[in-house]
Amino acid sequence: MSRKVLGIDIRKESISAVLVKTSLRESRIDTYAHVPISDSTEDKNPFKTALDTLRSEIDMDGCECVASISADHFSYRFLQIPFKDSKKIKMVLPFELEPTVPYPVDDLIIDFVDLESAGHSDHTDVIAVAVPKSELTPYLGTLGAIKMDPEMVTLSGLPTALCLANKTDAGKDQLFLKVDKTLSTLFIVSNGGIKLIRSFPTPVHAESGAGSLGAFVHRTLTAFSELSQSEYQPADMVVTGSGLNGANFDADVSRFLDLPVKRLNFADSLSIPIDGEDRKPWDPTLMDNALALALMEIEGIRGLNFHKGQFAAKKFIAKYRKYLVKTGILAAVVMALVFFNFIADSYTLNRQIDRFDRQITGIFKKTFPKVKRIEDPFKQMQIEVQEVKKNGEFQTATTSRILSIDILDNISKSIAESIAVDISRMVISPDNVIITGTTDTFEAVDDIKNKLEQIDAFKKVTINSSNKDRSGNEIRFQMKVVL
């Protein structure tokens, strides 16, 4: 998704703005402008006039805005906080700053730079940066008058220093000096972060300017080495700004500091295409910080922001209202579909349950027709089945332990071999055994009865009948054995 980000660098004497269009493929400079701020006493609001001129040159509709203001509005303090959590650090900063600043802390907006103190697990070294609300509010009010509400407001020069530390010369120890016509700001950069910020008036006389700036940088380096208790040795110094005087400025400062000095050109070093450069020359000394502001927002480089807490939720809603509405409608449609699907599934499931209940009731009625009152067929069926199982277990315990083969074996062993007997039929049931057969005499029938009565598994033996057959040679008998 493409974005348009407008960086506005507000100095004491002028405003620079760069509009960057970015996409997945590339970022390119779409439009840019530099507008001086009039020092005429007739103009009651020269900053507003300059902004109106800027708006007439750049189409600001639909773009995200980030801004920086002159560094002399801010106060800088080195502090040591006795814990690491950033939320706790923000909570205690007003109390730590109160004795050191000439403003009521309630009138300050505060942010901080974590110096990432290596080897210290019990505290955090920070640069606390504060700006009075009374000095920030006029800028925000004037920007609001032209319908610009910046995502970020920071100090001029810091975006350039952060982009140097994170993009062009990542991880390099170096100095960055932003020289404007009335104010200069020095940044000490080390290990991808900002270690010191100092602002001072730019020398008025051009012939002595390089020497004065060099002397100030030298004093600042000496103070930083004492403060950090380290021997800081920058590789070089990068300079930019509207106050650079002549082509010899770099060489003069380099000779004074005995340090390589080079001028900055972000668009060239990062190979960012510039649209319309043939019609309007690109001056990196005027445009680099505005470009760095836009790049900082695009790349997500964390820096100081003195406007993020001002109605953040309202700003977020206003910015993304169109997308939030679309997302809300889509979410509502999805939720409605989920709800209707749930209702349909519930209806189908209930119909299936009703059908299964009817089937269970029908099976129960067929299986247990004597039961007239049916309340819970499944549970009642479980109870009836348990009763049947109990009855089956009882019958097994009382009768089925005597196997048919055991009955035959006992009968065979009990009847003596001398008795001529022919068993023609035997009916074995759980309670009794009916034996039908023939033998030669009535005495043999009695003898068989007596022998069977001696079997332990037989409770009682009864002769049901005993008669001669038609030939008169054999006796037909029938006996009942109670098990």
Image (cartoon, rainbow, N blue to C red):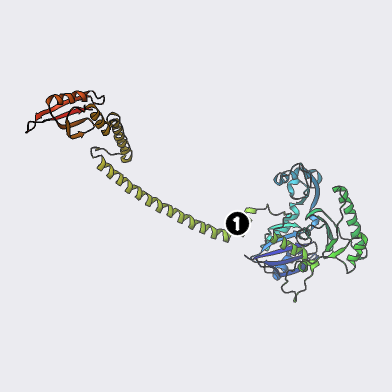
Along the line of sight, which residue is nearer the eye, 116 or 126?
A: 116
Given the image, on which type of amino acid does mark 1 rest?
Answer: Ile
Q: Which residue appears at 88% of the width and 62% of the height? A: 260
Indicate the quadrant containing the C terminus: top left, top right, bottom left or bottom right: top left
Q: Is residue 257 left or right of residue 331?
A: right
In the displayed structure, does residue 32 sit left or right of residue 360? right
Q: Is residue 243 visible?
A: no
| Residue at the (26%, 31%) spot, across then down | 409
Where residue 309 appears, as percent x and y from the top left, is 68, 52
Question: In this picture, is 118 found above or below 68?
Answer: above
Residue 79 seen from this side: yes
Residue 22 appears at what percent x and percent y? 67, 66
Q: Quadrant of residue 453 in the image?
A: top left
Which residue bears the numbered disc 1? 317
| Picture quadrant of residue 98 | top right
116 horizontally vs 393: left or right: right
Q: Position of residue 472 (x, y in %)?
A: 7, 31
- Above or below 349: residue 260: below
Residue reaching furthest to the bottom:
278
